[in-house]
Image (spheres, grey):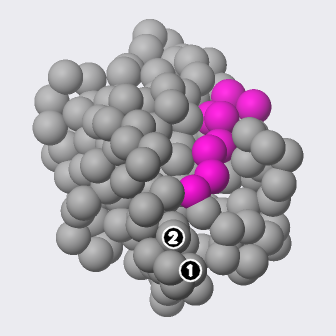
Amino acid sequence: MNKMTMHLALAVSLGACSPLGPCSSNVAAGTIAADVGGDAWSSTATFRGTGSNLQINAEPAAGWFMNFVLQRTIDGALPGDAVAAGVSPFDVDLADGGFATLYEDGAGSYSSNDGGGTVRVVQASATSLTACFAYTAGGDGSVDVHHGAMNATLAE
């Protein structure tokens, strides 16, 4: 079994993004999609390494946009180092090992630091990052983001 087949077998055998439930990150390249506050939402997504961290940005669409900063995996590794070493899947706790910020057009922002959640990076390379995610973003109220999937491309 080659390395790619092993990663695919591992991702399929996991079958879930604990605690995310089923992990379907099957979206088109450069796309992010989720259920935001009960409504289907999608946009374009890019990522970049910032030192040993990873930053993922989604463009504004349908009144929302979001970004993620992944600083430490649940196992204590640095996400940028994990990607460089070809290690996946890995999970990031969005209240402790990074954060997601959700912006509502004209109404402010919400952060997973005030709610919590998880990103599972299913596969990553120098040019693409595939992941699923779910989180609650708090602030002045809260917004639930569920059934998230992304296939972010490297930012230019």
Residue kind at label 2, given as amino acid type:
Met
Q: What's under tag 1, amino acid-wise?
A: Lys
| Residue depicted at x 79% and y 43% | 75
The residue lying furthest to the top in this view is 141
Question: Can residue 46 be seen at all in this image of the molecule?
Answer: no
Q: Where are the magenta residues, as a range? A: 89-96
Q: Nearer the viewer, residue 4 or 49?
A: 4
Residue that carries the numbered disc 2 in the rendered image? 6
Determine the residue positioned at 44% across, 55% down.
11
Q: With 92 as the anchor, is 129 left or right in this view? A: left
Residue 39: x %, y % from top left:
15, 30
| Residue 58 placement: quadrant | bottom left
Cα gap from disc 2 to disc 1, whole angstroms: 5 Å
Report the residue that reaches farthest toward the right: 76
The kind of secondary structure element at disc 1 is: helix
34 with respect to 98 (left or right): left
Q: Which label belongs to residue 11?
A: none
Task: Indicate yes or no whether the magenta region holds residue 90.
Answer: yes
Residue 92 located left or right of residue 40 = right
Image position of 82 with respect to 116: above or below: below
Q: Residue at x 38, y 42 (%)?
A: 15
Task: Look at the numbered discs 2 and 1 and tell me whether their residues touch, using CB distance below 8 Å.
Answer: yes
Q: Position of residue 44 (x, y in %)?
A: 29, 66
Q: Residues within 10 Å of mark 1 (few under 14, many from 20)?
A: few
Tally of numbered discs: 2
**Residue 62 included in the magenta stretch of the image:** no
What residue do we see at 44% from left, 75% from top?
Answer: 5
Q: Quadrant of residue 131?
A: bottom left
Residue pointed to by mark 1: 3
Q: Is residue 40 visible?
A: yes
Label 2, residues with CA under 10 Å away: few <14, some 14-19, many ≥20: few
Q: Position of residue 92 (x, y in %)?
A: 65, 43
